[in-house]
Image (cartoon, grey):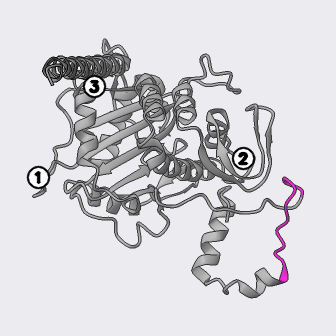
Amino acid sequence: MSHTGPRHRAALPRRRRVTRLATVCALSLALVIGIGVTLVYQKLEGNLSALDTDALLGGDRPDEVAVDRPFKPLNILLIGSDSRIGTGVGGDSAGLSDTTILLHISGDRQRAYGVSLPRDSMVERPECPTKDGEGVVPAPTGLSMFNAAFAVGGPACTIKTVEHLTDIRINHFVEVNFTGFRHMVDALDGVPICVPEEVNDTYGKIHLEAGSYEADGRQALDYVRTRTAISDNGDIGRMRRQQAFLAAMTNKAVSAGTLANPVRLYNFLDAATKSIRLDEDLDSLAKLAGLAKQLTDIGLDNVQFLSVPFETWSEDANRLIWTDDAEDLWEKIRADQPLSRRLSEDVITAADAPTQRTPARGAGGGSDSPDEEQVEAAEEPTAAELERAARARENGLCA
């Protein structure tokens, strides 16, 4: 029995050594993870690029309308630059805004809608600061194309023009270029699109297969750039395809497959923070994360994309002009109210998946003709559904 005591005493220090080792390992792992998180944060924070638009815009701006909401309603101008430097993208560009969307986020953080402002709109552009802030670009005589504002004065002039046209205070802006857009799509491992017919555009160097598939960054960029290859209405159709794509991209970015995948999420955040330029009031991860946290309760059905009401300009069939109905939309945004039924008739939501459709005969190997069983099973479409399908085809979307 005498040997049992020493053996017991020897076992206790061994357990203590194991416990201490486990504790040291846990602390070391926590330290490594902490350092890793810190380094990731510093890396992403260092990617951000900001522009002090407040200094450029001065004090002559619309007032913000006071509303009784938990948070301040936000109006964010999303600007897509068509710079082709280092992209391999075909065509020429004077550094215009290829896409501009006025994103309104409600004060109750329950809805968001993005309003596309056609680049080919003929508008009254006000006097603007130059890009370097050292001078002034005079207002042109008469109307000029909307996207020229970015060329003459960068984001500040685009903001100034939107505020002049809408009487809406722009709180923030986010600018992304072609290269950044492509990298963000690749970081998501692609975004679903549906192309109604094969595209071969030699001028723009665009080739797209017909059908429904996950588009990589280059395919996605081609899809949102092409104007007349799959629609005859130029910028109108392209604008609608951009809305459909942004809705699908939003869906993919907030999906479980992205948020639950640390590598994919990091790659997306890395690509996004490298790709954007924003205002100084939104130029840190903490500020961006704080805004993102406020938006967690917005359902995908309540993230909507639409276009400002417009019609063809009487003096040039290739140009557009905003209609009087646009003022109804601006009033809704100023008062932080939901869209009316009339304004939301043709919205695209982030919950909408790209329509799955077999390509037309001769455009990828499919057929438009369903078999007899499909015809018997299909319900007779309503007049509204037929009209919506016709608009989709006109805009180069799958019907």
Residue under numbered circle 2: 228
The kind of secondary structure the magenta stretch mainly shows is loop
Q: Earlier in the sequence, mark 3 or mark 1?
A: 1
- For label 1, the SS is loop
Is 296 positioned to the left or the right of 326 in the image?
left
Relative placement, left or right, of 302 versus 190 is: left
* Element carrying mark 2: loop
What percent of the width, then of the height, locates residue 191? 58, 45
138 within the magenta span: no
**Identity of the residue drawn at 21% across and 37% down:** 61
User: Is residue 6 placed above or below 318 in the rendered structure?
Assistant: above
Image quarter hosting the C terminus: bottom right
Label 3 is placed on what type of residue? Asp
Distance between the Cα atoms at labels 2 and 3? 37 Å
Residue beneath disc 3:
283
Q: Magenta residues, as a range?
A: 362-372
Identify the amino acid type marked 2. Answer: Thr
Task: Identify the residue position indicated by label 1 in the image.
Answer: 66
Count residues near mark 3 (Cα–Cα under 10 Å), then give few for <14, some for 14-19, many for 20+: some
Q: Quadrant of residue 135?
A: top left
* Sequence-wise first label, 2 or 1: 1
Q: Say few, some or many: other residues with alpha carbon within 10 Å of mark 2 (under 14 / 14 to 19 / 20 or more).
A: some
